Image: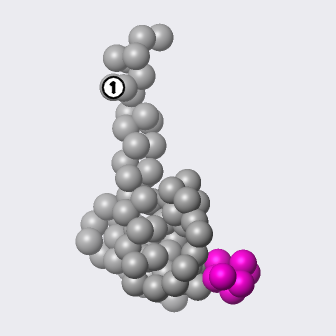
Amino acid sequence: MTLQTILNHPIFNQVILWTVLGLGVGVVAKLLIPGSEAMGWIRTILLGLAGSFIGNFLAPRLFHWPTYTSFSWQGIAIGIAGAAILVVVNRIVTRS
């Protein structure tokens, strides 16, 4: 398998998009909830991805909200809200 084949593969493109979305959502959530968390980039991406999952998958099912795609402005806003909740939970758990 060549590098060109890997880079053009749809799954690779989705992984890159989700990583960028997770990083963006995680950074915005950390900016909205000020504090001195010593989180690296990997943890920020994971926090953003988990926040997007909470906001876009669990919240509509728990609260009977409409379902949005993760890459719509509503989906990103809900993902940021989910990630902000996780920043607070992270602060409580790590006591930072």
Q: Is residue 46 in the magenta section? A: no
The span picked out in magenta is: 89-96
Indicate the quadrant where residue 6 lies: top left
**Callout 1, which amino acid?**
Asn
Question: How would you classify the magenta stretch by its main secondary structure?
Answer: helix
Q: Which of 52 and 68 is in front in this view?
A: 52
Q: How is the image coloured?
A: one colour
Q: Name the residue under label 1.
A: 8
The residue depicted at 47 percent of the width and 11 percent of the height is 1
At 55% from the left edge and 79% from the top edge, which residue is drawn? 36
Residue 24 image point, x, y percent:
37, 63
State the image quarter where residue 92 is shown.
bottom right
Q: How many marks?
A: 1
- Give the answer, above or below, for where 61 lies relative to 3: below
Crowding around mark 1 (Cα neighbors within 10 Å: few <14, some 14 to 19, many 20+) is few
Regarding mark 1 in the picture, which secondary structure is present there? Answer: loop
Residue 94 in the magenta stretch? The answer is yes
Residue 19 spot, x, y in % from top left: 44, 51
Q: In this view, does 35 lie to the left or right of 66?
A: right
> Is residue 69 something one can see in this rendering?
yes
Residue 37 left/right relative to 2? right
Tell me if 38 is positioned left or right of 17 in this view. Answer: right
Q: Where is residue 51 in the image (x, y as percent from the top left)?
A: 51, 71
Residue at 28 percent of width and 66 percent of height: 72
Q: Which residue lies furthest to the top in this view?
A: 1
Q: Position of residue 7 (x, y in %)?
A: 36, 26
Please say if 71 is above or below 89. above
| Residue 56 visible in the current orientation | no
